[in-house]
Structures are given as structure tokens and as C-alpha cells.
Amino acid sequence: MAQQSLFLSDSESEDIQLEDAHLRYFPHFLDEKKADLALQQLLSETAWRQEEIRIAGIARKQPRLSAWLGDPNAHYSYSGLHLAPSPWTPTILQLRREIQDLCLCTFNSVLLNLYRDQQDAMGWHSDDEKELGSQPNIASLSLGASRQFLLKHKTKKDQRYSMALQHGSLLLMSGNTQSHWLHSIARETTPCAARINLTFRHII
Ligand SMILES: O=C(O)CCC(=O)C(=O)O
Ligand SMILES: [Mn+2]
């Protein structure tokens, strides 16, 4: 039976056809002017932090800056890090409204990541923490430099995918994507400008 889509069909979007995943990409979700403005506002308005996480018991600083915002009860934990939400800002509430209208679902929190240059990155992981539920809808908005978003299947080792997430684009991940696939942002070898990514989430 065909999987039911949560998302409105839209000629400006593309279904990314991967086994055991449900991904829809909107390359021009924000036009250039709106995306430029959002990038500048988020760079200056966000209380960016470099968090320390624990992987296999070893503490390290994350190779990027981040911020966690949301409703007051939207607490989130991963890699030994416990995040209490900062309050929503008008800029992010406006972005949330537009994304919720598009994907017909609601989000009570957002993780912002700032990749300052080509050296900043995010390792392989799934957004599969128990607070997100078993089939989370995650809306990922990208601003600034285009970076490669890498995906690999957890058990089918020949299944890999890579896509550039461009300025103003939105990637919606849902269904079984997080239970079957890992994703990452690799370091680049050539210089690149700053990039901000926002992943809107629903903490249960
Ligand atoms: O920067 C990205 O596109 C990915 C961010 C991500 O995977 C996350 O915040 O969990
Ligand atoms: Mn993720």
C-alpha cells in the first residue's frame, strides 16, 4: 500500500526516492530576498553556544555553534547534553508559521546549528531520541552556504545518498526515515561561508 503523504503536493518540490524513507525537498521554500534577511537576522539575534558533548565517555566541543528554542516544556537530550529551551523569537515564529502551513503539522521546538565555515560539521546520527516519538516529522530549513547532506541506510550498506541543501531550501523528513537512515554534514576541503540550519521538531 502506498505510504500516505503528510505534505501538500507542490510542483516546486521533489520527492527524494529512497527505500524506507520519506523525504520531500523544496529548493526554493524561501525566495532569495527572504532567505538573505532570515540569515542576517538569525546570525545576529541568536545566542549561539558551542556545546560540549560526550561520545563513548569522552568530552568534546561540538564542531559548530548551536541554540535550542521552543515551548517552555520542550526539553531535549542527546549525547549527554540536556537542553532547556530558550524562548521563541519573532523571526523564528514567522518561519515556523510558514513551515507548519506547508507541511500541515505542528512543531514545538527548533534546533539551530551554525556552521561557521568549511571546518564545521555534524557527525552521523539519526534524530531518533525517544522525546521525538517513533515516526517524527522533522522540517530542516537551510540558509547561507550550500553544504552536502549525506544519508546512509543503517543496515543496507550499499544505500547512500548525497544532496546539496541550498540557501532558502526546506527538507521534510518523516515516516521511517529516522529509524532506517543516518545523516551527516561532512567537513569540506574548499573554503565556504557560514551556513545556518534549523530543524523544527515536535517534542512529546
Ligand atoms: O545541518 C543540517 O542540515 C543537519 C542538521 C541535523 O541533522 C540536526 O540538527 O539534527
Ligand atoms: Mn539530524
Image (tube, grey):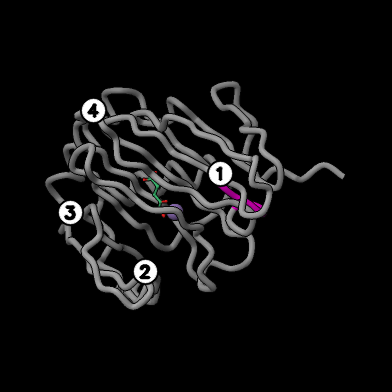
Question: Which residue corresponds to mark 2?
Answer: 71
Q: Position of residue 156 (x, y in %)?
A: 68, 48
- Looking at the rendering, the quadrant in which ligand 2 lies is bottom left
**Is residue 12 shown left or right of residue 19?**
left
Cα gap from disc 4 to disc 1, whole angstroms: 35 Å
Element carrying mark 3: loop
Crowding at dot 1, Cα within 10 Å, few <14 / some 14-19 / many 20+, comes out as: some
Mark 1 touches mark 3? (CB < 8 Å): no
Task: Say which amino acid is labelled 1.
Answer: Cys
Q: Earlier in the sequence, mark 4 or mark 3?
A: 3
Cα gap from disc 2 to disc 3, whole angstroms: 16 Å
Q: Earlier in the sequence, mark 4 or mark 2?
A: 2
Residue 190: mark: 4
Q: Please tell me which residue is depicted at 17% across the width and 61% down the height of the picture.
A: 49
Task: Say which amino acid is labelled 2.
Answer: Asp
Q: Earlier in the sequence, mark 2 or mark 1?
A: 2
